[in-house]
Image (spheres, rainbow, N blue to C red):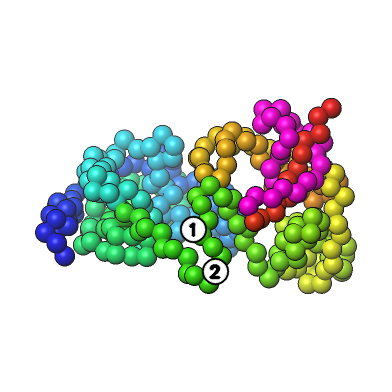
Amino acid sequence: MGGESDELGTRLKAYEGRPAASTGVGKDPVNAAMIRHWCEATGDTHPAYAGPDAVAPPTMLQAWTMGGLSGHESRTGAYDELLGLLDASGCTSVVATDCEQEYLRPLRPGDEVTFDTVVESVSGRKTTKLGTGYFVTTRTEVRVAGEPVGTHRFRILKYAPAPRTPAPKDTEPRRSPGTRPRPVVNRDNAGFWEGVAGHRLLIQRCTGCATLRHPWLPGCNACGCPDWDTVEASGEGTVYSYVVMHHPPFPAFDPPYAVGLVELAEGVRMVSDVVGVPYDKVRIGMPVRLAFRSYDDVTLPVFEGVER
Ligand code: ZN
């Protein structure tokens, strides 16, 4: 390891033990509404989390310390400084790698949490598949009325992205940066893309209960039957919803442009380009008609707006 990287490593190490948040106060006491939302979102129906004697799911530990959109006043400058140093060194990308929690006692509605966070450790310089950088671990001690109730460790990798490796020779040829991303074709959806290549939009139909489905799936959500055939879409549809993309820019696309959720006459919906009308003329309920457009070597279904 060269002297230059050691120098950065040494400067980063100096942040170990420094506070990242001090005397933080949970924005809300532990409460039944957040517990219910969490359980609904995660599909956790454990009886311990409902009813008059409910406790909070232990994994919610971090939730009670989060600042939300408006952030926390308890945050110190040390953690931002540390991340700033990493940014300045070229480690501008970040990925959360893991989290570890320890639970000392269950949290109950009404508990008011306080917390302190320290920069626990900064690794030496590491090279991963993503790129070269440093793992930064913070440790948050959570308390209620001064008594420790749990510990939350959170680790990120701040790294300089590795250069893209060229595709091996025997796969598809390398494309210029402005070409469309390829569709991901797999065993479950290959029939759909074969249809598209022949300018047919095929909708899967369950042979058990005749329910139509899109996108393609290995089985029926309505009855569980794995058998299916297809029906060809008439090509008529309406814009069920849409967004106008402005950002982020991507070389294959020329913003602003409209992306529609199109409801086909058959009843299923699919996401696709709405073309042939200015992006700011696309409207919910607008009739659209299927078309196929070729971009380099890929054919994609799009929908042309039918102006009235
Ligand atoms: Zn079915």
Which of the two residues, 122 or 90, is positioned nearer the viewer here?
90
Residue 57, label in figure: 1
Q: Which residue corresponds to mark 2? A: 171
Q: Is residue 45 left or right of residue 10?
A: right
Q: Position of residue 215 (x, y in %)?
A: 72, 57
Residue 241 painted magenta: no
Q: Percent from the top left, x then y, of residue 104?
A: 35, 62
Q: Is residue 248 above or below residue 232?
A: above
- The residue lying at 63 percent from left, 52 percent from top is 296
For residue 276, above or below residue 96: above
Q: In front here: 160 or 52?
A: 160
For residue 189, which quarter of the picture?
Answer: bottom right
Q: Give the residue at x 82% y 72%.
A: 227
Numbered mark located on residue 305 in the image: none
Q: CA distance from mark 2 to mark 1?
A: 47 Å
What SS does tag 1 mark?
A: loop
Near-viewer residue (17 or 236): 236
In which quadrant is the N terminus drawn? bottom left
Q: Secondary structure at mark 2?
A: loop
Kindly identify the amino acid type of the residue bearing the numbered disc 1.
Pro
Is disc 1 surrounded by few (<14), some (14 to 19) or many (20+) residues within 10 Å?
some
Q: Is residue 92 left or right of residue 211?
A: left
Q: Quick one: label 2 or label 1, which is nearer the N terminus?
A: 1
Which residues are the magenta region? 272-296
